[in-house]
Amino acid sequence: MKLKILTGLLALFFLQVNYSEAKIVLPSFFSNGMVLQQNAQAAIWGSSDKNALTITSSWDKKSYKVQPASGNWKVKLTTPAAGGPYSITIDDGEKMVLNDVLIGEVWIASGQSNMEMPLKGFKDQPVANADEIIKNAKNEKIRLFLSEKVTWSQPLTDVKGQWKSASSEAVTDFSAVAYGFAKNLQAKLKVPIGIIQVAWGGTLVQAWMSAKSLSPYPDVTLPQDNNVALENKNVATGLFNGMINPLVGYQIKGVIWYQGEQNRHEPENYLKLFPAMVADWRQRWGIGNFAFYYVQIAPYISKTEKLSKASLELQPKVPFLREAQLKAEKIIPNSGMAVIMDVGAQNTIHPPDKQTVSDRLTALALNKSYGFKSVPYQGPEFANQVVYGSKVFLKFNHADGLYFKNGTTANFEIAGKDQVFYPANAKMTKDGIEVSAAEVQNPVSVRYAFKAWAMGDLFNKNGLPASSFRTDNWVVPM
């Protein structure tokens, strides 16, 4: 870690040297090969040691005059419908030209290791069908920006990276989920797609939040405001400062997010923090409630690794974290959650099937952001329960063609007021599911797949799974 920090400090030193020598300085994401959001007021910004600049966009030959304030400048370009390549000329007496600029759809991909996981996989943890995906990856209309991983004590203005066209080389180290999402969108929309990856494995949601958004939580310790690299990636607000703040204002269509495992010890707190993070990001971008689509954490428990006592103690809380994510969808406007109860892998927290994850995020985007209303994205959603004697009848929304994958299921449990759960019999009815167990004559609650590890098997006719759920509101275990 110390070597990484030293490397980062050296990079910043040389960056500062280059800045002092340059007349026009841009953040690294404003560069050749970038993608700007179509039909938008897309901001670009930078610094100059001159009193005036002219920015000219080749798509409409329009020139924008700007006078730097204390050396810094910012201008919004009116972008056309998707197309390109174009160029942008920045002239302060000396010209800088950004070439190969595409206009299309721009998304940020963020979160922890399941978003970071590249197509080449992690050590001894492959991505399914990666070789085939990598081999066929060439596409000039998909542009990928892979950011450096930086955690910092105060907000930075740049995060280093480079725009690359999709190719076998470029996608190998890029997020498998984010690339799959981009590939799906490009194939459907037929426009350029830009994906900016800012993700880091094993990170808390607190690290991705601004100091302001964390101010209502006095138990969260913020770093000292001394403008240094942080040794721990999970220091609150460090990743926001280093990786998100530099991007604030870059015109986007939305965000895809895959995170939560690191917060599995605090599901109730997560339900407060996660929506607060989204609200803060949106407020800072200033473009309204941009789309925010996220992935519910997959079922997982290791049988091949020797789990620590702490890990074993956290297992009962995992389904409550999934529940917090499920509830967050009702709190966060213009959001959607990809349920992957059928994608988990028992022996790894990094399921190899990343394409299904990409497909479900894509379905959310196509239906909710791009108007493809015939694209299904919603699995069965528990609506209510009715108790008749010793039986509980469950009803669901989005339940057309409700079925169990294998015809029967062992994923339901039932309990009385003593809160002791027993395996339950579950069978389909004409409008829902009937649940019962001989041990429970006066049922109160039903739970479905409400464990750290349970392979989901409840689907609707579109082949989309139900989230794990419970019908009670009993206290989360300590």
Image (spheres, rainbow, N blue to C red):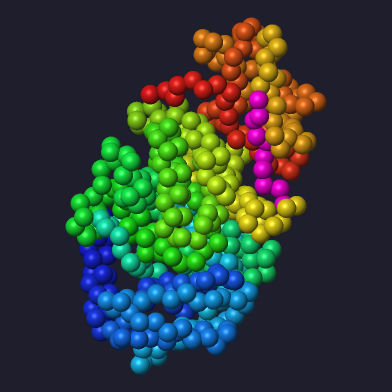
- Residue 25 versus residue 317: which sits nearer the camera? 25
Q: Quadrant where the N terminus lies?
A: bottom left
x 48%, y 41%: residue: 348
- Horizontal side of residue 458 vs 350, given as left or right: right
Answer with the quarter of the image where residue 46 lies: bottom left
Location of residue 476 in the rendering, given as x and y in whole percent from the top left corner: 44, 24
- Horizontal side of residue 206 vs 354, given as left or right: left
Q: Is residue 289 above or below residue 474?
A: below
- Horizontal side of residue 71 vs 470, given as left or right: left
Question: Residue 139 magenta-drawn?
Answer: no
Confirm whether residue 378 shows in the render. yes
Q: Quadrant where the C terminus lies?
A: top left
Considering the whole magenta stretch, tell me its main secondary structure.
loop
Location of residue 288 in the rendering, given as x and y in whole percent from the top left corner: 51, 57
Location of residue 4 in the rendering, given as x and y in whole percent from the top left corner: 27, 60
x 41%, y 41%: residue: 273
x 49%, y 86%: residue: 63
Confirm whether residue 202 shows in the render. no
Answer with the quarter of the image where residue 182 lies: bottom right
Q: Magenta residues? A: 375-384
- Residue 442 versus residue 142: which sits nearer the camera? 442
x 33%, y 50%: residue: 212
Location of residue 239 in the rendering, given as x and y in whole percent from the top left corner: 34, 54
